[in-house]
Image: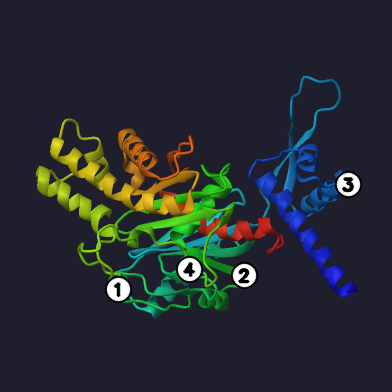
Amino acid sequence: MEKETGQNSIRSKQFNRGLIFQMIATGSCRTRIELARQTGLAKTTVGNIITEFMDKNVVEECEEEQTQVCGRNPILLKVSAKAPKIIGLLILRSRVEAVLCSMTMEILRTEQIRFPGRLTGELLIQYACEAVARIYRQETNVTGIGVSAIGPVDIKNGVILNPPRFHGVNHVRIVEALREQFPLPVYMEHDNSCAALAEKLFGVGKAEEDFLFLGISDGIGSGLISGGKLFRNSRGLATELGHVSIHCQGPPCSCGNQGCLEMYASTGLILDKLRTATGLELSYEEYFRLPDCRAAREILEEMIQHIAAALVSVINMLHPELLVLGHDCMDWDDASVALLEQIVNEKRIAQDGRRIPVKKAYFGRQSQLVGAAAIVVSRIFSGELQL
């Protein structure tokens, strides 16, 4: 019983340290008084944690906050510039990218290696380790590595399973390979789950407990925040909105299903349709800003209708409070975002007087990359990983 009590005390202390650091890093609380008030912890407990953080160069005091009341102004707290950094690794179909981030998700440095041609599991591991090594050789004050990978992925075992259209590469034990190369904790999540996590901790989803992240490119992915936490099932599998069928007799998808959303709304497919219909060789973004082109507008509006069809099905099951758009959706004009918001709110079953807003991601096209680092910082916030 004494051993169990001692373990509970340690876990409680770790949780409190993580919570205090999260509030400082995300800007939720900036003074000792605010931290004690928001957490319900004793002022002495908060003070001891802050002193420990300062001794370790994790947190520092900065300029005084100007107030109108008499007495001493409170000292503001922020993450120290000397605090450990985080390495994130993003694995996509065409390349790997590594990033060095601060604890507040500021991007400090990036490295990229594009796949030159044929890819194997062994080559993928080689490129991934090299991208991380380029960062680590320059900055060794690192607390962990986060891996953001196209799915499906087995996050419990750190394995990239069988992503469609990924050069035939499958079942790559990427986390194990990185742990062998670098003396750091390594964590992995689905790339769009990473994006959702970054938006929850530091972006447009900070105030929401339930929201869906939708990423559209040559594939379509999703990440889900449910009850304030990143969703994945008991085996570590994440959501796959791109492979929700919106037409059971539709075109065959690379996943083996028919009529998947990817077959109606992925960027490459839509670009092909736009160029054929208009005879113009424009970028995805330029088509959204093309004035008075009925053919282009009809194709884009049909695409949004298809996306809405898949989203409404998910909304009716999960009832998110927000939809966050990322990747190539950053190119959408305001009218297209508004149209998607209008359709999903008109067609969802729960008409409770609350509108589900649709917003673009705070981190934009870098949500997946920053999200890789967010995996590590989320472990710090939870108390699982100690600074």
Q: Quick check: marks 3 and 1 in contact, CB under 8 Å?
A: no
Q: Residues within 10 Å of mark 2 (few under 14, many from 20)?
A: few
Eye-nearest disc, 4 or 2? 4
Earlier residue among tags 3 and 1: 3
Is 170 above or below relative to 314?
A: below
Quarter location, residue 246: bottom left
Earlier residue among tags 4 and 2: 2
Q: Quick one: which residue is furthest to the right in this view?
A: 2
Residue drawn at 38 percent across, 58 percent down:
241
Residue assigned mark 1: 167
Residue assigned mark 3: 44
What is the distance, in whole Å, between disc 4 and disc 2 at their CAs?
24 Å
Disc 2 residue type (three-letter):
Leu
Report the number of discs: 4
Q: Is residue 80 visible?
A: no
Task: Classify mark 1: helix, strand or loop.
Answer: loop
Task: Classify mark 4: helix, strand or loop.
Answer: loop
What is the distance, in whole Å, between disc 2 and disc 3 at their CAs?
33 Å
Percent x, y for residue 298? 18, 40
What is the distance, in whole Å, between disc 3 and disc 1 at their CAs?
57 Å
Disc 4 residue type (three-letter):
Leu
Residue drawn at 16 percent across, 30 percent down:
292
Q: Residues within 10 Å of mark 4 (few under 14, many from 20)?
A: some
Eye-nearest disc, 2 or 1? 1
Residue assigned mark 2: 184
